[in-house]
Amino acid sequence: MHENLVRCEALETTFDSIARGLVAALREAYDTACEHHDPGEGGNSKTFGYCLYHYAVHEISNSPEKEDGRLEVISTDPTFRFKVGEFELACHRVPAGDIWDSFPRNDGAVGEMVDTELWLPGCGPAEESAMDLQDVRKVVLAHQGGPDDGLVAAYICMPIRLNSAGQIEAWGYVKPLADSADFGRANPKDDMPKTPPESIDDVSVRRKRKSKSNDGE
């Protein structure tokens, strides 16, 4: 298990106050994605991830934190970017497992979150210590979960290195958001409103009389 070697004060203080709101938005997105996921109609991991991405964009863009000014949406299409304080964020699901070894699988725009201008003179992208993390202002809201469990973890991660395909392959700093809200859902039906049992009033039952037959019995 990796650990942060230093504490990034700016990141910690910025996201402490908004962590619960980000988690709430992600959980809503997961709940919606789980509700509409149907393997019987062709749903799979790819369709779940695609829909989840757009549900997350919707929830974050319409969150109370956006309304009260603590969060600013920069763009929603073709890429989703938003700001919290001085930090610019992308939002992506990453594979389950140790977050230090889990990265967005897509290439392209998310690679732009690695700020190569912050590499120290004489250092290159292959060295994890090549970047002054205190100056990093591009981070990823990385989350883990799936159609069976919903949201199970969320983190603010600093990307510091790309592979040859332009994909993120190293985090320099990770802030867990796990203490901000309950994660997971043991059963999607557990989130459904429960119907209270109907109360049945006492009913007096009157015994039906037998009709008399023609022979008098």
Image (cartoon, rainbow, N blue to C red):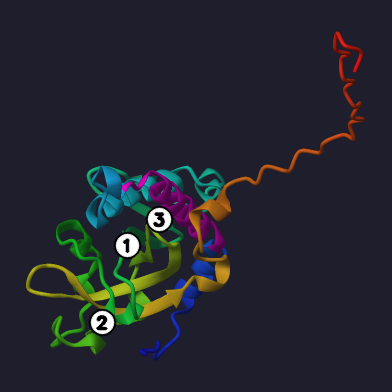
Determine which quarter of the picture holds residue 193.
top right
Which of 1 and 149 lies nearest the eye of the viewer? 149
Q: Which residues are magenta?
A: 20-38
Q: Position of residue 175 (x, y in %)?
A: 44, 76
In the figure, is residue 23 to the left or right of 105? right
Q: Is residue 64 above or below residue 126?
A: above
Q: Which residue is mark 1?
A: 93
- Can the viewer see residue 14 in this picture? yes
Q: Amino acid at mark 1?
A: Arg
Q: Residues within 10 Å of mark 3 (few under 14, many from 20)?
A: some
Which of 186 and 83 lies nearest the eye of the viewer? 186
Q: Amino acid at mark 3?
A: Lys
Determine which quarter of the picture holds residue 21.
bottom right
Q: Position of residue 142 (x, y in %)?
A: 36, 66
Q: Which residue is mark 2?
A: 131
Circle 1 — which element?
Answer: strand
- Can the viewer see residue 80 in this picture? no
Q: Is residue 9 magenta?
A: no
Q: Nearer the viewer, mark 2 or mark 1?
A: 1
Q: Earlier in the sequence, mark 3 or mark 2?
A: 3
Question: Residue at (25%, 88%) from the top-left corner?
Answer: 129
Magenta region, main secondary structure: helix
